Structures are given as structure tokens and as C-alpha cells.
Image (cartoon, rainbow, N blue to C red):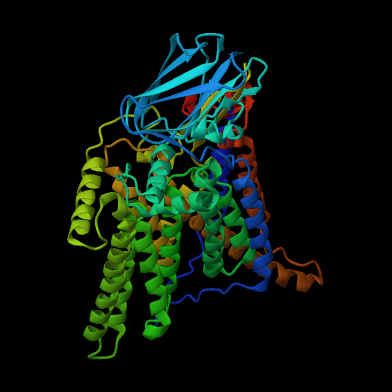
Amino acid sequence: MLTIIFPAVIAVIAVVFTALGFPPAPVGRLGADGIAHKPHPMEMKDFLPLAFLIVIYAGVAFAGIGVPQAPQSFHRFSSVGDSVTLEIDGGEHAVSEIMWYSGIGRGEYLVEISRDGELWKQQGVWQQPNSDQLRWHSVVPVIPTARYLRITAQKAPIYLGEILVRAPDGSDLPFYRAGDLGDEADTAPWRPDYLNGTYFDEIYHVRTAMEFLTGDTVYEVSHPPLGKSIIAFGISIFGATPFGWRFMGALFGVFMLPLLYVFLKNLFGRTRVALCASIVFAFDFMHYTQTRIATLDGFSVFFILAMFYFIYRWFVMPLSAKPREYLPWFALSGLCFGIGAAVKWTVIYGGIALAVIWFMRTLLVALEAPKGEGKRLFLRGVGEGVLFFVVVPAVIYLSSYAVCCRAWRVRFMSGSFLKKVWENQEYMLSYHSGLKSTHPYQSRWWQWVCDLRPILFYSDKTSETERSAFASFGNPLFWWTGALCIFTLVYTAVKKRDLIAAIIVFGWFTELSPWFAISRCAFIYHYFPCTVFLALAIGYQMNGLCERAEANAAKGAGKRLKAHENAPPRRFPVTIYVFTALCVVMFLVFFPVLSGVPAPHEYTKTALRWFSGQYPF
């Protein structure tokens, strides 16, 4: 019953909140010298609440993100038949478990056990496919006592990180002269899980990031290299550990918050609106889960948010502004566009909106220019657009492939290098357009808008009654309210001629609309770029509520003067605080299925399994 009542109540709250703030107050109408809107600066009173939000969210984001240790030395089996024999120190022992850490490289091992080193019994064949690397595995031995363990490569080259055997009492049994296969037994966990190994698409991106650092053949080439280079930077600092390869993603998730806060403060000039809307975004389920996994989406969304913030600052400059006043904002937007495109192609979707925004302002400058100056100013705008949104991004994009030079055995920017880069673009296009695979958690764009089908990243039964699981999807209160607010901004853009509202709607639409015609397997996390526009739309709604409260307060002040009343007017509606608090409460309610913290299966089944099991908890 809760799985029906709960979403119904959330839907009602979303509708009521949106209705109370309708229509949003316009903030960016066209004036005599461009958009009649001046960005509100940050004030001293902004820094304390912003710092508090950053510290609180960073603590939540980094807590339980992954262990800071994992095997760092690997034994390389160069060819088929390469073999290693390990001897348990102290002679024959009872063995209850064998744990091994798979390195990188696709292959398999023949594993044999012996009590005397003469008679060998096959333990089995350990598979190390592309989908099962950089993680711990647990195997029950076929014989209860052993002294020797022999591992032989059946497919090579392949890397193996560590071997550990355990006695029935749970103690670790050290090997005698085990070399790089027994030198890091202290990194072995009690049981394999997401905290000590890769999961979901980390198996591709983390491996490739490590290959960038070692110069080995690059495995994952279905996306541009820069996002994996950012992951590699975290690995270079903290090591090839779960904490190391997830660190940069979580850090970028934190970085999004001050950027969004400044954006909201510039738009509305209200500290509490900026703070509340930023809190709502911070504790969105997808923002939390998606930035704690070593994939590319957190980086791309950060640069999407940055490029739209900077283009907004450029767009609202007076039409008569000098190049030294507006060009820094324009250049920064182009720079972020180029960096984002070198992370993931989805950033290019937002570039369509940037192109329209650029054309609108460039045309306005030309039309409002003094007689005889319009053509020159238009051509100058075209030149600026080509420089900062074509040339600079192209240089950044090409430069991102420098990390591949060692693996490709080519010199940077040589003819062979350019040929390799071009071939990679052809491969990416054919791969993504021709992808035919299916997935049990795939979904379509309209399911994303309605937040109907999460993608389950991890699931493990920790006991008879408890389960550890987490998924990527949205906070329903945030997503449903945000979608409604997007449609209210359509009204504001058309009826009130609010161009900033139009930019937000168009940004949301351009990130979503390419998926209308894409039939390949897709997932709800492809909607992640749209969530920054949902946050901005909710900020508009909160600002509208404040505008209405202030107008009512002004009317009430006149009545109080007549009645000689001294009670101060309420200028910030409590509705905004309630909505923000409810979004945080939703985060806490769903926290077990966002973080992997073991939770009673009865709780997730009776309270969180929404939409006839579409929420797979």
C-alpha cells in the first residue's frame, strides 16, 4: 500500500508547489540595450551558507565511497602456458576459501591444488572477461587441505593482482616467497563488494585510465579520452584503489554546488533561493549516485553547467558593451564547451542551445548598432563564435588524445596521430549509432522525465533479511516538480517574453530532444544533464513565490499602517523551506538504495518498490 500512497503524495506536493509559484516572475526581458537584467553579485552573507552546504554534502559524498587500498602490483602472464606455483608457508593447511584479485586484460587461468607438489587436482578455470576486472573474487577449494597452488594462463597476456587463502577459522595463510601475488594480502576484504572493486561501467573507464598511465593498449575508445584522463589523475594521487578511481567524480559532484549557487544568486539575487535550490540539487539521487562512480557523466554535467553559466553572463551584457567586457565570459563558455565535448559527446547537444543563444545576441547587436556598423559587428560576432566555439574546442579535443600517443606509438599531432584520431571518431559514431544490445534496466526518454525506471548498479544479498543495493535515478519530488516548472517557464518565456527563461527551457530541451529519435539501448542517467536545468527552473519558481510574498507584504504593510500595527511582514514564504526539507527527507528515505548501505529487504520492498516493481528494490 505504501508503494501506491507514497508516490501519490509526492505527486500532489509537486503540483501544489508549482501551482503556488505560477507564473514565475520574469527576470530577463528585452530592453533598450539588450536584456534588462543585471546579474546580482555574491555577498558576504552568501559564503557561510554555501560553505556549510559544501562541507555537509562533501562529507556525505565521500563517506563510504570505496576503500583506499587494493593490490597495486600485478603479475603479468605474457603468453599462454605461463605458470606460477605458490606454496603455503608452514606446510599443508586446511583451506576454506581462496580469494583472488583480477587485474586488467581478458583471459583465463587454469588453477590446480596439490598437497605434496606431485599430485595435482584441478580447482577450476578462473575467467577474467572484460566485464569482471579489478575486483576481488571468492572461491571454495575443491579439496579441504592443500600446500601448493598452481596458476597457469590459458589466454594471455593477462594481469593477476593477488592470491589469498584462508583457513576455516578465518585467518589468512601466508605464502612462502609468493612475489607480487602474495605481497599485498592486507588489502583483501572479508568479502567482495562494491567498496573494494569495480562495478557497472567502471570496468571500462578505470581500466582505460590505468592504461593511460602505463602506456598499454587502450581498451575503451567509445568515448573521447578526457574523462578517463581525469579519473587517471585521481588514480595517480591515491593509487588504483576504489577511493582513488572514484575521487575525481565525487569532487566534481561537490564542485557543481558552488557553481550552481553562484548561477542562482546571479539570476535572482536572493541568498535563500540560491541556497534552497542548491540543496535540492545537491541531494538529488542521481547527483549523489552518479558522481560516486568512476564514469564520465559527472564531469560532462559539470562542464554543461559551467558553459551555460558563462554564456548567460555573456548574453546579459549590454549590447553596447566593449569586447574586453564581454569576451572573457564568451571565451570561458567556449572553453568549457570544448573541455566537456572532450569528455563525452552529450555535451555537444547543449552546444546547439549555445549556438542559438550566440546567434540571437549577435543579431541583436547588429540590428541595434549605429547605421553602417551592423554588418561589421555581425561579422565580428561570427569571428568570435568560430574562434571560441570551433577552433578552441577543436584544439582541446585533439589535445585530449595526447594520452594515447604511447599506446598508439605515434607522435602528437603527426599525420599518423591525426589519422588515428579520425578513425576513432568513425568508430565512436558507428558504435553508438549501431548499438543493438539490450539491458534489463534500459529505458526511453519519456520514462526519464517521469522518473519511472532506475538503473540498478549493484545488488547483493548480505543476509537472509538484508540486502545491499543502489541505483541511479532521480529524487521524484525534485524531478516531477522540476519538469512542471520547466513548463511554467515555457509560459513565462512566451507570454512574458523572458529570454532567460527561454534559455533554460531550450537548454533542457536540447539535452533531451536528441534522445527522441535514438532507438539504441539507453538509460536514465542520460537525463543527468537535464537536471541542472530542473534546478534552475525550481529556482525560478522559488523566486516567484518570494516576489508574490513581497507583494502581499507590501499590501499588508499599508493596512497595518492604517491600523497602527507593528508586526513585520513575512517576506520569505515558508513553502520554500518545507519543499527543500521534503527533498532532503526523500534523500534520507531512499538512502539505503542510493549508497549500498545494507537495509532490511522488507523495508525496501514495502516502501520503495514503486510502480509495480519498476523501482527494483
Looking at the image, residue 359 sits to the left or right of residue 243; the answer is: left
The reply to whether residue 377 is in sight is: yes
State the residue in front, 439 or 363: 439
Looking at the image, residue 446 sits to the left or right of residue 246; the answer is: left
Q: Residue at x 38, y 73 (%)?
A: 330
Looking at the rendered image, the quarter that the N terminus falls into is top right
Residue 412, given in percent of the width and then of the height, sits at 27, 61
Displayed quadrant of residue 436: top left
State the residue in front, 358 or 66: 66
Residue 440, given in percent of the width and then of the height, sits at 38, 27
Displayed quadrant of residue 312: bottom left
Q: Residue at x 63, y 27 (%)?
A: 599
Q: Residue at x 22, y 45 (%)?
A: 427
Displayed quadrant of residue 432: top left
Residue 70, given in percent of the width and then of the height, sits at 54, 38
Q: Residue at x 52, y 57 (%)?
A: 256
The image shows residue 416, relative to residue 393, as above or below, that is: above
Looking at the image, residue 34 sits to the left or right of residue 176; the answer is: left
The reply to whether residue 19 is in sight is: no
**The furthest residue to the bottom:** 371
State the residue in front, 507 or 499: 507
Residue 460, given in percent of the width and then of the height, sits at 54, 24
